[in-house]
Image (spheres, rainbow, N blue to C red):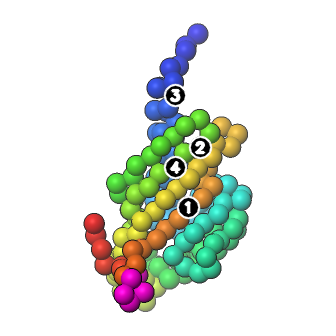
């Protein structure tokens, strides 16, 4: 009989959560809505950069990604500086994401860095994204988002 320590289990869970978030990167680059669907809870709540203020449910989240896929011929996505906290049945993380690629008209965009937060739940032994939020810093004087930041 093998007994796992809490530390080993915690490390295993963190690795599983990282694989879920890596799955976002892979699915976006492949423009694969079915793969994305498998990463979210059915009742996911997303605060994305596009209106409305919230997207509720996996179908609403996927509709948002479908709009991205309609704009991009080729999608690039990267996630950097990801920090995670994992405890039992919940996990949260934050980092920076950048959507880039080739637009449908053939022009190439380097995209912009955004702040990203992910909250996950363990459902039936599988880690799934239950909430995400993407934001850009705001210039208080102009009320405009600052989309050219790299740090």
Q: Position of residue 141 (x, y in %)?
A: 36, 87
Local SS, label 3 = helix
User: Is residue 143 among what the camera can see?
Assistant: yes
Q: Which mark is residue 91?
A: none
Q: Which residue is mark 1?
A: 132
Q: Residue at x 54, y 45 (%)?
A: 91
Q: Nearer the viewer, mark 3 or mark 2?
A: 2
Q: Would you say the residues marked 3 and 1 are in contact, meaning their CB atoms lie under 8 Å apart?
A: no
| Apparent side of residue 51 relative to residue 112 in the rendered image (left or right) | right
User: Looking at the image, is mark 3 or mark 2 earlier in the sequence?
Assistant: 3
Q: Position of residue 52 (x, y in %)?
A: 62, 79
- Position above or below: 15 against 95: above
Spatial distance from mark 3 to mark 1, Cα to Cα?
Answer: 24 Å
Please check the rendered image and state whether residue 86 is part of the magenta-colored stretch, yes or no.
no
Neighbour tally class for label 4: few under 14, some 14-19, many 20 plus, Cα within 10 Å: some
Spatial distance from mark 1 to mark 4, Cα to Cα?
Answer: 9 Å
Local SS, label 1 = strand
Local SS, label 4 = strand
Q: Residue at x 51, y 24 (%)?
A: 6
User: Looking at the image, is mark 1 or mark 4 earlier in the sequence?
Assistant: 4
Q: Which residue is mark 3?
A: 9
Q: In the image as oriented, which residue stretches furthest toward the left?
A: 151
The one of 78 and 130 positioned closer to us in this rendering: 130
Location of residue 65 by image quarter: bottom right
Q: In the image as oriented, which residue stretches furthest toward the front?
A: 141
User: Looking at the image, is mark 3 or mark 1 earlier in the sequence?
Assistant: 3
Location of residue 36 by image quarter: bottom right
Q: Would you say the residues marked 2 and 4 are in contact, meaning their CB atoms lie under 8 Å apart?
A: yes
Q: Which residue is mark 2?
A: 90
Q: Which residue is mark 4?
A: 92
User: Looking at the image, is mark 2 or mark 1 earlier in the sequence?
Assistant: 2
Point out the stretch of residues depicted in magenta: 140-145
């Amino acid at each position: 009989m093998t007994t796992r320590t809490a530390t080993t289990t915690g490390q295993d869970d963190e690795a599983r959560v990282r694989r879920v978030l890596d799955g976002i990167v892979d699915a976006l680059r492949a423009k694969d809505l079915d793969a994305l669907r498998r990463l979210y809870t059915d009742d996911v709540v997303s605060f994305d950069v596009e209106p409305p203020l919230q997207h509720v449910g996996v179908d609403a989240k996927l509709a948002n990604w479908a709009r991205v896929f309609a704009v991009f011929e080729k999608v690039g996505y990267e996630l950097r500086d990801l920090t995670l906290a994992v405890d039992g049945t919940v996990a949260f993380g934050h980092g920076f994401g950048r959507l880039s690629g080739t637009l449908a008209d053939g022009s190439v965009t380097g995209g912009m860095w955004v702040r990203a937060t992910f909250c996950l739940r363990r459902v039936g032994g599988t880690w799934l994204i239950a909430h995400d939020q993407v934001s850009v810093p705001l210039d208080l004087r102009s009320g405009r988002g600052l989309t050219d930041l790299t740090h």
